[in-house]
Image: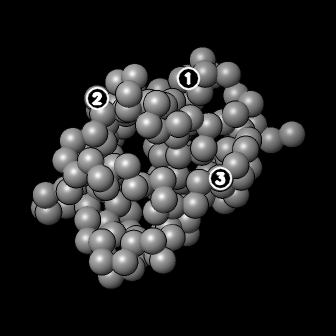
Amino acid sequence: MRDFSNIDDYADITPTEFARLVKTTPSREMERLLNGEQRKAVLDGIFARMPESFRRDRAAGLDAVIQWTITGGANGSDTYEIRIADGTCTTSSTRSTEHPKLGITVAPVDFVKVVSGNANPVLMFMSGKLKAKGDMSLAVDIPNLFEVPKA
């Protein structure tokens, strides 16, 4: 069985397989992984897959930059941006000069759990584990804009 220790490229595993790995991996082990050398590879892999899971049919007329700040890590945090415009979705690990319509701040383990379908983003927000600033209607709509895997 595959686990996080024997994955070379996180963009190569299916979203469903990733969701199962997250579900079966203890939080302490996830913390070690996401605070260690593989952090960037995991985060880059997740964001690389987002355009594939984007549901363009649900984004008509949407033009937005969503900035994700994943706390912790060697530099204090990692920032990624999702750009949705003209029915397309692109991602970047470089901050744009454009002001984000929505900013989301979350710890790495909580982020991985949310994007893999292993945590409820509304409950994470209500408990303060996920912080959102900006367009709250967009924040509520994010799960509808992407195909979230089932573990």
The spot of residue 14 in percent (x, y) is 70, 57
Label 1 element class? helix
Return the mark for residue 108. Answer: none
Mark found first going from the N terminus, 3 or 2: 2
In the rendered image, which residue does mark 3 sit on? 149
Residue 121 lies, with reference to residue 59, above or below; the image says above
Q: How many angstroms separate mark 2 from mark 1 (CA)?
A: 16 Å
Q: State the scheme by which the image is colored.
A: one colour
- In front: label 1 or label 3: 3
In the rendered image, which residue does mark 2 sit on? 76
The spot of residue 8 in percent (x, y) is 66, 49
Residue 73 visible in the current orientation? no
Instruction: Name the quadrant of the N terminus.
Output: top right
Q: Which amino acid type is shown beneath numbered disc 1?
A: Arg
Disc 2: CA contacts within 10 A as few (<14), some (14-19) or many (>=20): few
Label 3 element class? loop
In the rendered image, which residue does mark 1 sit on? 32
Asked whether, in this view, residue 115 is left or right of residue 149, the answer is left
Q: Looking at the image, which is closer to me, 109 or 139?
A: 139
Label 2 element class? loop
Say whether marks 1 and 3 touch (CB < 8 Å).
no
